[in-house]
Image (spheres, rainbow, N blue to C red):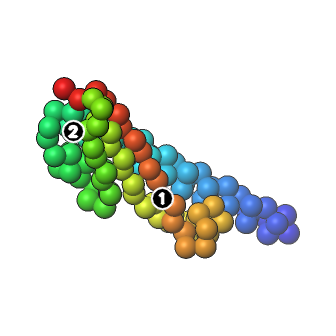
Amino acid sequence: MEMALVLPLLLLVVFAIIDFGRMLNTQITLTEAARDAARSVSLGVDPAERVTRIAGPDVAIEAECVNGAAEVRLTQDFVFVTPVGLLGGGFDGEVELTARGLTPCQ
């Protein structure tokens, strides 16, 4: 009887840990790609190849070099793999992650 009461709560916590870990890993990777892409823009190189190599092909890139600073904004949709996404990410199970890289233009 106790197992029937505790198991759903335990599974919810385990699924939340799994999805949170995946989302945190994706956010860290996206931040690294934004920093690297901003450096590319500051050197006058197209950042798309570096972003694709680091974060994957499904990342939206906005890059500009204005007022002596190269700024890159990356956006990627994160899809939950467990049922926790229905609670935390809305009813479609997706969250939009963004990252920003900023570096002086050279």
Q: Earlier in the sequence, mark 1 or mark 2?
A: 2
Q: Is residue 32 visible?
A: no
Report x, y in % for residue 48: 20, 51
The front one of 77 and 60 is 60
Which one is in front in this view, the residue at disc 1 or the one at disc 2? 2
Q: Which residue is mark 2?
A: 41
Label 2 Cα crowd, 10 Å radius (few <14 / some 14-19 / many 20+): many
| Tag 1: amino acid | Glu
Report x, y in % for residue 37: 26, 41
Report x, y in % for residue 25: 44, 46
In this picture, residue 6 sits left or right of residue 68? right
Label 1 Cα crowd, 10 Å radius (few <14 / some 14-19 / many 20+): few
| In the rendered image, the vertical position of residue 5 relative to residue 105, given as above or below | below
Q: Quadrant of the N terminus?
A: bottom right
Q: Quadrant of the C terminus?
A: top left
Q: For the point 35% across and 34% down, which residue is it? A: 102
Q: SS for tag 1?
A: strand
Q: Which residue is mark 1?
A: 96
